[in-house]
Image (cartoon, rainbow, N blue to C red):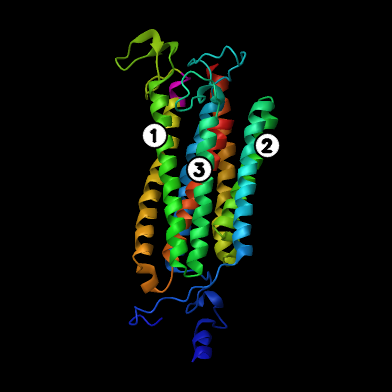
């Protein structure tokens, strides 16, 4: 980059409407999933099935945010995996702490 | 020249990780933002999983939804706790306000991607426009959260009659209004504690995000990035802002829906 001619403006590339349309489409999907979750909260009975569906929909939303908004999918493969793979540890944390909580429940009540 | 430059890095012995090239194909700043976000994912995950662990250690509310009353004997039903809306005093509008907050944050995330996209095209006018919308969304969200907290702390008209150990170490039975770290009218003490810590920590992230957004907006507007030759700062702050949205999606599910 020629740093000394700082007066010259960068060349502006015209809008690619396809790309912008795709961003709005992702937004619509995210809002739609949230609306569905909202609806389910009032129509379905509270229980494990509903919780499971909520968590599945949330992870689905997270996938859209990470891939389409944060462009993680377009990064180099080693970078992609160095972000995704460590999350495996969370699976163990969930199992360990929920077990712990259930045991405290048994002990206390 | 360029052929020798690539030849330095890829040694037949050490492969692409031997030095001299960029196996991750990202700038230092972007890489560090990603690893910071990874560590932040663990922090928030620890908070939310702790919520789950404490929650399953209490019995669930088993009675009818119409006669719900807060008690520290069982965990409250979130849609019966968070049912208020500004200027709609006394009305039962479950989760409407948090739903609105979620919509605001998702939309501000969308305007942020549009700013990043404009940055790729070196389009200063578009970057400034979308950064301003994102900033507005962030400030709206923070204002909503301030109202939500204030309502949670002051509580409902009726309150709940609870037996608990107060700060003087005495067992008392009295009507409790609102919430603090010792007692709250909605459920066990840890319910309010978790609410304050999780949404507070998220709100703290949003506050930092708004400050960063303002800086980036200002620098884009006065042409700092144009002189620099690229809009990568918008991209990095964008990553952070999307992360804040990502966390809220999980907080919304675990705190308000389940």
Residue B98: assigned label: none
Residue A24's place in the image compared with B176, above or below, is below
What residue does disc 3 label? B104
Q: Residue at x 62, y 52 (%)?
A: A26
Figure quadrant of residue A109 = top right
Q: Secondary structure at mark 2?
A: helix
Compare residues B85 and B10 and report the one nearer the observer.
B85
Q: Nearer the viewer, mark 2 or mark 3?
A: 3
Residue B57's place in the image compared with B141, above or below, is above
Residue B63 image point, x, y percent: 61, 13
User: Upstream in the sequence, badge 1 or badge 3?
Assistant: 3
Which portion, as a residue range, is magenta?
B186-191
Residue B148's place in the image compared with A92, above or below, is above
Residue A53: assigned label: 2
Compare residues B248 and B99 and report the one nearer the observer.
B99
- Identify the subunit bearing mark 3: B
Bin the neighbour count of mark 2 within 10 Å (Cα to Cα): few under 14, some 14-19, many 20 and up. Answer: few
Residue B146: assigned label: 1
Measured in 3D between alpha carbons, the distance from the residue under mark 2 to the one under mark 1, in whole angstroms, is 30 Å
Residue B189's place in the image compared with A58, above or below, is above
Q: Secondary structure at mark 3?
A: helix
Respond whether the residues carrying marks 2 and 3 are from the same subunit: no
Residue B116 image point, x, y percent: 49, 61
Q: Nearer the viewer, mark 2 or mark 1?
A: 1
B100 magenta-colored? no
- Identify the subunit bearing mark 2: A
Respond whether the residues carrying marks 1 and 3 are from the same subunit: yes
Bin the neighbour count of mark 1 within 10 Å (Cα to Cα): few under 14, some 14-19, many 20 and up. Answer: some
């Amino acid at each position: 980059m020629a740093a000394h001619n700082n007066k010259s403006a960068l060349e502006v590339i015209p809008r690619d409407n396809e790309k912008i349309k795709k961003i709005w489409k992702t937004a619509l999907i995210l809002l739609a999933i949230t609306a569905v979750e909202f609806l389910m909260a009032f129509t379905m009975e509270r229980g494990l099935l509903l919780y499971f569906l909520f968590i599945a929909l949330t992870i689905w939303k997270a996938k859209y945010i990470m891939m389409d908004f944060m462009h993680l999918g377009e990064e180099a493969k080693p970078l992609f995996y160095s972000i995704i793979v460590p999350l495996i540890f969370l699976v163990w944390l969930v199992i360990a702490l929920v077990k712990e909580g259930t045991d405290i429940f048994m002990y206390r009540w | 020249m360029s052929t020798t430059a690539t030849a330095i890095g890829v040694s037949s012995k050490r492969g692409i990780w031997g030095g001299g090239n960029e196996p991750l194909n990202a700038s230092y700043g972007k890489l560090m933002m990603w690893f910071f976000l990874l560590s932040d994912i663990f922090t928030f995950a620890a908070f939310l999983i702790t919520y789950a662990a404490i929650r399953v250690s209490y019995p669930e509310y088993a009675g009818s939804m119409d006669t719900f009353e807060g008690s520290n004997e069982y965990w409250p039903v979130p849609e019966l706790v968070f049912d208020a809306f500004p200027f709609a005093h006394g009305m039962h509008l479950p989760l409407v306000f948090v739903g609105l907050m979620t919509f605001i944050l998702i939309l501000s995330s969308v305007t942020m991607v549009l700013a990043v996209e404009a940055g790729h095209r070196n389009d200063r006018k578009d970057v400034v426009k979308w950064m301003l919308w994102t900033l507005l969304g962030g400030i709206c969200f923070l204002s909503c959260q301030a109202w939500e907290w204030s309502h949670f702390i002051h509580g409902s008209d009726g309150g709940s009659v609870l037996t608990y150990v107060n700060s003087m170490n005495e067992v008392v039975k009295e009507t409790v209004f609102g919430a603090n770290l010792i007692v709250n009218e909605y459920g066990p003490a840890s319910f309010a504690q978790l609410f304050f810590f999780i949404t507070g920590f998220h709100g703290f992230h949003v506050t930092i995000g708004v400050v960063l957004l303002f800086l980036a907006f200002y620098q884009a507007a006065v042409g700092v990035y144009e002189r620099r030759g690229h809009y990568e700062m918008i991209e990095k702050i964008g990553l952070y802002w999307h992360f804040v949205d990502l966390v809220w999606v999980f907080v919304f599910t675990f705190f308000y829906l389940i």
